[in-house]
Amino acid sequence: MSKLLFTSESVTCGHPDKVCDQVADKILDELLAQDSQSRVACEVTCAENQMHIFGEVTTEAEVNYRAVARQVIEEIGYTQPGRGFDAATCGISVDLHCQSPDIARGISRGRDAERMDAGAGDQGMMFGYACNQTDSLMPLPIELAHELAKRLESVRRTGELPFLLPDGKTQVTVEYDGNRPVRIASVLVSAQHQENVSIEAVRSEVRRHVMEAILPPDMLDENTQFFVNPTGRFVYGGPAADSGLTGRKLMVDTYGGYARHGGGAFSGKDATKVDRSGAYMARYIAKNIVAQELADQCEVQLSYAIGLAEPLSVRIETFGTERVDREILSRAIINSVDMRPAAIIQCFGLTRPIFSNVSCYGHFGSNACLMPWEKTDLQIKL
């Protein structure tokens, strides 16, 4: 087998796009906490000294959207005046209106939790993926990128590296021998920092406290390349330096590009939107197939039509690694799993305010290990 490289990236909670994702999911959770049947499609964008919250919300809940946004921004760490974006002074505008009655008509049957005939809130296709490269059954590059990004946030919050600021990105390139990861070829961390620290200090401290603390030594060798802030200075960051928008980190949220993606974002959407619930179910199916050693890797595609409950298609791809005939496996999944949106919502308890837990560092894998779609309890009836 030929040796190939694959790269995935992650970002910290202070990245502008992730600021927006966190605000959108926090608003969703606040709405669900008061009204579990809230219909939410909340988008957020931010730039220097401003944030805009817009979209569609139908709910009986009463939420102070601006206060929620300021709370999230403060928790992230944007609290210093004069840096172009801080929780206390940034302007926040809100433009939310009720869900389209045409869309509501297709899914309104689902307001009775006992009925499973609620239609999907939109058309689209979703992918789920799993492989046996890691204990979490995720591709190694994205798992390592997430762990580095979480570590970068951790050493900032604990004061271990007090010069760090909230924005940051990570990137990991893994060398594969066929489908087997054999070494880490390169690692990149870009960390926003205070102005009064030298680039030499940033590079040495980030390498020691972040990279060396996370990366498995047996995957490193003398040829592994390490990069910290390769352009040098990274003082001006966050929404003050670059605009942010919900749903712009699809690969970071899922499989780091290692698997296909249907194009639909997650954050700010309630689970009647199959972009979210369908993707969670697809991951659940794929993970259970790999966990039960029916295949070494598995990709599941689901597709839906707006207003219809049953998926239009179900595809199970195991890339020649299956230990059971693929047609038998596909029939077993169809017979074992109820993939109607209302059934997915009931199965995973997706009317609960749980979504802020996965707004950063991935909706799948070790970051989401406590989420219901990451369980390996599916009874596949072969």
Image: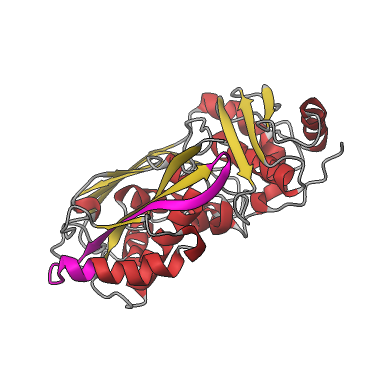
153 vs 202, nearest the viewer: 202
Image point 42% across, 59% down: which residue? 221
Q: How many marks?
A: 0
Image point 59% across, 26% down: which residue? 105
Q: Is residue 194 located in the magenta-colored stretch of the structure? A: yes
x, y (%) of residue 38? 55, 45
x, y (%) of residue 169? 33, 54
Position of 230 with respect to 358 (left or right) is left
Image point 64% across, 38% down: which residue? 282
* Figure quadrant of the N terminus: top right
129 vs 181, nearest the viewer: 181
126 vs 22, nearest the viewer: 126
* Figure quadrant of the C terminus: top right
x, y (%) of residue 193? 21, 65
Position of 38 with respect to 93 (left or right) is right
Position of 314 with respect to 67 (left or right) is right
| Figure check: 324 above or below 293 | above
Q: Is residue 131 visible?
A: yes
116 vs 168, nearest the viewer: 168
Image point 69% across, 38% down: which residue? 342
Position of 367 with respect to 77 (left or right) is right
Magenta residues span 177-202
Q: Quadrant of residue 106?
A: top right
Q: Is residue 100 located in the magenta-colored stretch of the structure? A: no
Q: Is residue 254 visible?
A: no
* Model colouring: secondary structure
x, y (%) of residue 58? 50, 40
Q: Residue furthest bottom?
A: 159
